[in-house]
Each structure stands twice: as C-alpha cells, then as structure tokens.
Image: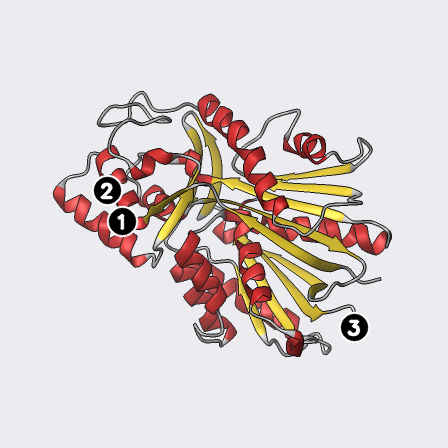
C-alpha cells in the first residue's frame, strides 16, 4: 500500500529582516572591531541569503528590544529558561499558521510533531490536538532534537503508519524557532550558524490515496558518517542551544552523499531523477551536493530559492523546497521522480526517492 504527501502548508513569522540588517545587529551585539565587522559582513553576503524570518523583532532594530536586554552587549543574556518560554509562546501560533495553509485537516487520525529548537510538556502535540479540535484519541508522536534531517524521520513514520493502515490520515508538523538560540561567541562555528538559521513551520498531510497532484513516498535511505560527529552538533548550553557547524561539513556531505548514491545505484530499480529537493543547509553544502550528484544549480533551483528567501529553517526547510517544487509542477509531470536529501548531527545523511502522482494516474 503506497503513501502520499497530498498537501504541504508553510508559514513564517511576521518579522522579515534583511540579511544585511541582521549582520549589523550581530556586529553590535558581539562588539566587533572594524576589521572583524568587515569579515562578518562578507560572511553574511557570501551566504546568498537575502532575508530571514524570526519570531524576535529585535534583529531588525537598534534599540527598544523585547527579547534581549537593552544594552550594547545584550547583557544579561537570555537564559535557556527564557528562550524556552519564548518557544512555548510562539511555537503553537506558527504551527497553526502552517496547518491553516493546508486545504483541510478533517479526519486526521495521527499527529507527528518535529522540532529541535524547543521542548516542554504537556507539549506542542497536545496543544495542536486541542486547537484543531481533533479527537482526544488522536495518536501522537514527537520527534525531537534531530536537527535539519528531522522531517525525513517524520515522513518515514507517517509513511509506515499509512502503509499499515490505509484509513489513516497523518498530519506532520515541523516547527523550528532557530533564532531563539543566537550565541555571541566569536568562534567560527557560531558565527556561521548565526548567519544561516531562521524560523519557520511546515505542515504535511500523508494519506494512502493521492489527490490532484501529490508526492508518492517511494523509499528512504539513511547513512551515518561517524567521522563528522564533532563537525555538526547541537548542545544545550546555559544560554540557549549551541550549534556546532564546522567548515568541513560540505566536504563530509560530498563524500557521504557519494557513498550513499553508490548504494542507491546498486538498486537496479532506481529511477532517473527529474527533480531534486535538497535541504539548503547553506550555499557550500548545496554546491557540494551538486558536485557529487552531477547536477547544475539550475537543477537545484528550488533549494536556492528557499535559501535566498528564508535561510535555513532546520527540519522544515526541505518541506519548503518540496512545496515550491509542487507549485512549479503540472499534470504533465505526473510519473516523474524526485531525489530529496537532508543532513544533520551524526553526521547523518537522510535521502528519499519520491514520485509525482495524481488520483488519475
């Protein structure tokens, strides 16, 4: 029994901030010298991100902050407790905004939530059930702290549920508030992560029957590169979650993706890929993936568009890419195949082979 993504909804917070404006905020907050400021501006330009969205308006201001202290160095810096309070305040409204972008949530039987940027209990899953008026018996699964590849684990669980029970209708919600975890440390890892991450949410319906234009979840693949375990990591610090993001990641992704594709090509039923939906973890990662896959930036255009318009929103970002791909497809594309992948702590590589489908196929 197949499983299909029948619709994808996306949402971002109200505060849209230019990348250049965020750079100036970071320069002031970190109290950089003029030479350090020039380097940081160059780093922000090199990301090819034009704007990002945040639940925190402070990144677009020079005074009258709400979340950070109104001091030159933002001290006292927000604690984990304060950041988790903000997560609880903003996560549900943004998740519901993404869900409202779906055509309908009627008859949902299962709910899966994915997030790596906040935790509390009773959690977001229960709040969504109550807010949507879903039955109290709705089965809930929470996938937490997996980073940018978390959506793939959510899709795997949803696919397995639908394949086991064709009557199931699964709602998957990815919600990430990455900008709550800005760190002032001048280490290269933190400077890079501050330049990339943003806030967003995506909601997906997975069912056993396709709609007018859907994505069949054909197969999934996973690999672990233990040699990269220290190059991408996510730790809980005293002042928020701390992202380790090494400059070696593109090289590791390139090598790991090469090994993964070798394994895939050993499968004689592997189709020719017509479209690509790669998680835009950053410009260098996209370029590394293209080099290994033998594709051009044009083949990867949807990932670049999402990176430019939204930045890296962790787990929900690849769903934004898939949504953009669907928006640009027509009935003439039914039957074409998609290769999708994402990367995260571990170093983990997750990939999926998908197929465009419709109820009339």
Q: Is residue 164 left or right of residue 350?
A: right
Q: Earlier in the sequence, mark 2 or mark 3?
A: 2
In the picture, the quarter occupied by the N terminus is: bottom right
Tell me the number on the disc at residue 24.
2
- SS class of the residue under badge 3? loop
In the picture, the quarter occupied by the C terminus is: bottom right
Camera-side residue of 65 and 159: 65
Binning the other alpha carbons within 10 Å of mark 1 as few (below 14), some (14 to 19) or many (20 upward) gives some
Q: Quarter of the image holding residue 186?
A: top left
Q: Distance from label 2 to label 1 (Cα)?
A: 7 Å
Q: Is residue 341 visible?
A: yes
Residue lying at 63% horizontally and 55% vertically, measured from the top left = 8
Binning the other alpha carbons within 10 Å of mark 2 as few (below 14), some (14 to 19) or many (20 upward) gives some
Locate residue 220, reporting x and y percent.
Answer: 68, 61
Locate residue 72, reporting x and y percent.
Answer: 21, 27
Locate residue 44, reporting x and y percent.
Answer: 29, 52
Residue lying at 75% horizontally and 48% vertically, measured from the top left = 170
Q: Which residue is mark 1?
A: 20
Locate residue 274, reporting x and y percent.
Answer: 59, 76
Name the front one of labels 2 and 3.
Answer: 3
Name the front one of labels 3 and 1.
Answer: 3
Q: Quarter of the image holding residue 123?
A: top right
- SS class of the residue under badge 1? helix
Q: Distance from label 3 to label 1 (Cα)?
A: 47 Å
- SS class of the residue under badge 2? helix
Q: Are marks 2 and 3 in contact (CB under 8 Å)?
A: no
Q: Are marks 2 and 1 in contact (CB under 8 Å)?
A: yes
Residue lying at 47% horizontally and 41% vertically, measured from the top left = 13
Q: Is residue 193 left or right of residue 167?
A: left
Q: Which residue is mark 3?
A: 360
Camera-side residue of 294 and 105: 105
């Amino acid at each position: 029994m197949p499983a299909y993504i029948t619709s994808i909804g996306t949402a971002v917070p109200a505060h849209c901030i230019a990348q250049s404006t965020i750079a100036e905020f970071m320069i002031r907050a970190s109290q950089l010298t003029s030479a350090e400021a020039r380097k940081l501006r160059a780093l922000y330009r090199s990301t090819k991100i034009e704007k990002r969205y945040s639940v925190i308006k402070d990144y677009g201001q020079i005074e009258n902050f709400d979340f950070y202290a109104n001091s030159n160095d933002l001290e006292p810096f927000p604690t984990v407790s304060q950041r988790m309070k903000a997560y609880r305040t903003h996560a549900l409204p943004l998740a519901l905004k993404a869900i409202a972008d779906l055509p309908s949530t009627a008859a949902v039987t299962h709910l899966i939530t994915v997030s790596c940027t906040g935790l509390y209990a009773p959690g977001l899953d229960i709040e969504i059930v109550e807010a949507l008026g879903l039955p109290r018996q709705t089965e809930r699964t929470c996938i937490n702290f997996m980073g940018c590849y978390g959506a793939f684990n959510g899709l795997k669980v949803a696919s397995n549920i639908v394949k086991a029970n064709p009557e199931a209708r699964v709602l998957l919600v990815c919600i990430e508030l990455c900008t709550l975890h800005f760190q002032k440390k001048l280490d290269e890892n933190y400077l890079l992560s501050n330049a990339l991450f943003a806030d967003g949410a995506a909601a997906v319906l997975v069912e056993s029957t396709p709609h007018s234009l859907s994505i069949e979840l054909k197969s999934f693949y996973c690999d672990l590169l233990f040699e990269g375990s220290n190059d991408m990591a996510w730790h809980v610090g005293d002042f928020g979650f701390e992202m380790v993001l090494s400059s070696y990641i593109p090289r590791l992704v390139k090598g790991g993706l090469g090994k993964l594709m070798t394994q895939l090509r050993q499968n004689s039923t592997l189709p020719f890929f017509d479209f690509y939906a790669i998680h835009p973890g950053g410009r260098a990662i996209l370029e590394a993936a293209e080099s290994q896959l033998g594709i051009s930036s044009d083949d990867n255009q949807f990932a670049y568009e999402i990176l430019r318009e939204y930045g890296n929103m962790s787990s929900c970002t690849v769903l934004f890419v898939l949504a953009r791909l669907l928006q640009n497809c027509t009935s003439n594309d039914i039957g074409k195949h998609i290769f999708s992948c994402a990367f995260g702590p571990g170093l983990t590589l997750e990939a999926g082979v998908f197929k465009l489908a419709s109820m009339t196929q």
